[in-house]
Image (spheres, grey):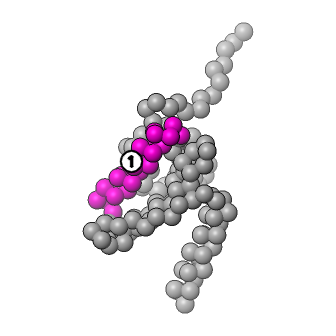
């Protein structure tokens, strides 16, 4: 029964991702010829968005996530697009994103939206306010 519930949850998540991110690419991560996780990325004309990155517990803390995100940072740099992602505010992965140069672009009670703009790009900034 647990397997059926997990399959239903996976199917619901997949359908929601497909509706929200129609250009997404779903890739399986391999390490030592073993399945180590997955990464889902949606690339549009305006940005590259990491929809989901999951590394199985046995493969965590081995630099796999860092390597994958650096590859997408290189792609974002080459295409001159921001690389974005959303993460639960309490997720320990935020430390990785901070370390890789992502900055917070939006936050609410649950999620933090982060963006990496590379060395040659600029983030959208608030207009400067001047007193007259």
Quarter that holds the N terminus = bottom right
**Is residue 103 visible in the rendered structure shown here?**
no
Residue furthest right as drawn? 132
The residue depicted at 45 percent of the width and 45 percent of the height is: 75
The residue depicted at 59 percent of the width and 29 percent of the height is: 125
Residue furthest bottom as drawn? 1
Q: Position of residue 128 (x, y in %)?
A: 63, 20
Assign the magenta stretch its main secondary structure. Answer: helix
Quarter that holds the C terminus = top right
The residue depicted at 50 percent of the width and 31 percent of the height is: 121
**Element under label 1?**
helix
Q: Is residue 28 above or below residue 65?
A: below
Q: Position of residue 30 (x, y in %)?
A: 35, 67
In the drawing, does residue 22 fall left or right of residue 34? right
In the drawing, does residue 53 fall left or right of residue 17? left
In the drawing, does residue 10 fall left or right of residue 129? left
Residue furthest top as drawn? 132
- Callout 1 crowding tier (Cα within 10 Å): few <14, some 14–19, many ≥20: few
**Is residue 28 visible in the rendered structure shown here?**
yes
Q: Nearer the viewer, residue 39 or 7?
A: 39
Residue 15 covered by magenta stretch: no
Q: Is residue 30 above or below residue 108?
A: below
Q: Position of residue 79 (x, y in %)?
A: 50, 40
Q: Quadrant of residue 47?
A: top right
Q: Nearer the viewer, residue 54 or 128?
A: 54
Q: Which residue is mark 1?
A: 70
Q: Position of residue 87 (x, y in %)?
A: 52, 54
Residue numbers of the magenta segment? 60-81
């Amino acid at each position: 029964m647990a397997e059926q519930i997990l399959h239903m949850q996976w199917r619901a998540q997949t359908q929601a991702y497909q509706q929200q991110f129609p250009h997404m690419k779903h890739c399986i991560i391999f390490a030592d010829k073993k399945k180590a996780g997955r990464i889902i990325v949606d690339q549009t004309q305006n940005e590259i968005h990491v929809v989901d990155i999951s590394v199985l517990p046995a493969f965590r803390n081995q630099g796999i996530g860092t390597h994958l995100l650096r590859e997408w940072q290189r792609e974002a740099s080459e295409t001159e697009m921001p690389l974005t992602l959303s993460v639960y505010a309490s997720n320990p992965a935020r430390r990785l994103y901070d370390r890789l140069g992502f900055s917070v672009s939006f936050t609410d009670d649950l999620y933090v939206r982060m963006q990496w703009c590379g060395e040659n790009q600029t983030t959208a900034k608030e207009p400067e306010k001047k007193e007259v």
